[in-house]
Image: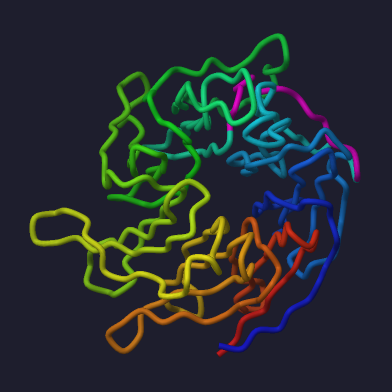
Amino acid sequence: MNIQKKIIANLNKCYSISLLERNGKPCFLVAAEKHDPCYLFSEDGTKLETVWQEPGGVMTMTPVPNGNGAFLATHQFYSPNDSANARIVIATPVAENNWQIRTLAEAPFVHRFGILNRNGVNYLIVCCLKSGHEYKDDWRTPGACYGAVLPEDLSAFNENNQLELKLIKGDMLKNHGYSVTRREGYDTAVVACEEGVFQFTPPAAAGEDWTVEQLLSIPTSDAVLMDFDGDGKLELGCISPFHGASLVIYHLDVHGNYVPQWKYNRPEAETEMIHATWACDLLGKPTWIVGWRKGTKDTIAISWGDGDYVTEFIDRNTGCANALHFVNSEGKDVIIGANREIDEIAMYTVTE
């Protein structure tokens, strides 16, 4: 695996990233964790627009389906100790460097969220890290997951007319991790917290109940589901515990239980605060991109080869907070890294 790195911008505490289509062209967004901007880039890494200058506190961004460049984002989640005013906003392009920002829903402590589609209906799932806060590192009130049907037309929502969120599941301490996987032709969410890993399946029809299945009971910070070894079963890749240093892939046994299959063998003092996580097909192989923000601050790619898992370095000493992958218009594999610990937005072009 050959990697060509290009630093495309510097952004204080760069954190959240998302793919987006703007004016019919593939783009991506990068936003900051603190009181700093959100930028829109073309797929080649050219900075196109500044979406906002502040308030920042952006943990998650995702495009609105058929939204012609509109997207949803968290605002004002600055840390686990400063997120009581967090909310989800709608960003709608008006003109170049002119975006309308409106509140979709106030959601204190919202860390991750996503849009899932099933049978033609879009569902919003909102994952809140905790439910209350009175002092620093107050974890007395566990987080929760909420859901709602996401209407096709979001123009009516604002500070005074918010989307109603309904509780799906509570009692989720340190509710941190979120990823999406397809299951029987529809989207499901994989959510990780202190109680373990849960798979959330949206209703078959609007108005019905969500289905929640526990996959693992080990405290987990983030998790992905992917068939890494090609046996037709989905492996479960986990970062443990909350903001932890352990990287383990679990395999389904004959009884349908997830059991450890592989563990990254570096000393955990080197892999503190594993945070970046993205499962994708990289160079045609199922791959898990992972980065950590302390210790050696490396970013690696994990895949299956010759009967075992293999790891390759994408970058070193950068402290990547989040990463994403896409295939560009030239058919090349590209990874975007929000290298938070050095305020660097990096583009990696990956070839054989």
Q: In this view, does 225 lie above or below 137?
A: below
Can you say which quadrant of the picture contains the C terminus?
bottom right
Q: Is residue 158 left or right of residue 288?
A: right
Q: Main secondary structure of the magenta part?
A: strand
Residue 144 lies, in percent from the top left, at 44, 26
Q: What stretch of residues is rendered in magenta?
A: 97-110
Q: Quadrant of residue 276?
A: bottom right
> Magenta span has 180?
no
Residue 279 lies, in percent from the top left, at 47, 63
Q: Residue at x 65, y 41 (%)?
A: 59
Q: Which residue sits furthest left?
A: 255
Q: Residue at x 51, y 74 (%)?
A: 301
Q: Is residue 332 left or right of residue 44?
A: left
Q: Which residue is drawn at 78% across and 62% down?
A: 342
Can you say which quadrant of the picture contains the N terminus?
bottom right
Q: Is residue 74 left or right of residue 274?
A: right
Residue 176 lies, in percent from the top left, at 50, 41
